[in-house]
Amino acid sequence: MVLANVLQPLITIEEWTLEALHSIGFGWGLAIVGLTVLVRLCTVPLVVRQFHSQRELREHMPEMKRLQERHKADKPRLQREMQAYYREHGINPLSTFAPLLIQIPVFISLYYLMRADVKSGLFGDAGFLFVPHLTDKPHGIVLVA
């Protein structure tokens, strides 16, 4: 549970938001959906930044492939040439992963929040749409479409 303790500030903020959504009149199911939408909206700038970094890296891919073909026999030289190319064009290959790494704690803390709320009985007998009880284990096919 060390990870949960490190993420406790995020869990507290998410729990406060969930309870605030419920207190303004949303049912627990709709409050969970609302919290999920709010979290996704907060992470949109990170996702957009990640997509831009990926696109920029993809635009330089043909030249990087040419470098790899040219220096495939000499790995140390290939590394030097790739680093020089990255430096020359202002590319950081790890920049595509940074936004993803920032999102991971947010979604892990959501998992811990939901797990703790289910165990505490906070949701009670609340249902949502075709799900009779949010905390019940699934019993067979709930929705046939």
Image: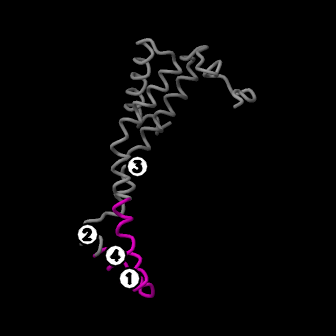
Q: Where is residue 55 in the image (x, y as percent from the top left)?
A: 37, 59
Give the residue type at disc 1: Pro
Location of residue 118 by image quarter: top right
**Whole-Å distance between the Cαs marked 3 and 4?**
24 Å
In this rendering, is residue 114 above or below 67? above
Q: Mark 3 points at which residue?
A: 101
Q: Where is residue 101 in the image (x, y as percent from the top left)?
A: 40, 49
- Name which of mark 3 and mark 4 comes first in the sequence: 4
Seen from the viewer's position, the closer of residues 136 and 57 is 57
Q: Name the residue under label 4.
A: 82
Q: How crowded is mark 1: few (under 14 residues within 10 Å), some or many (20 or more)?
A: few
Q: Which numbered mark, 1 or 4, is in the foreground of this view?
A: 4
Q: Which numbered mark, 3 or 2, is in the foreground of this view?
A: 2
In this rendering, is residue 47 above or below 119? below
Q: Does the magenta stretch include residue 83?
A: yes
Q: Mark 1 points at which residue?
A: 76
- Name which of mark 1 and mark 4 comes first in the sequence: 1
Give the residue type at disc 4: Met
Q: Name the residue under label 2.
A: 89
In this rendering, is residue 28 above or below 70? above
The boundaries of the magenta stretch are: 55-84
Q: Does the magenta stretch include residue 129?
A: no
Give the residue type at disc 3: Leu
Q: Which numbered mark, 3 or 4, is in the foreground of this view?
A: 4
Q: Which numbered mark, 2 or 1, is in the foreground of this view?
A: 2
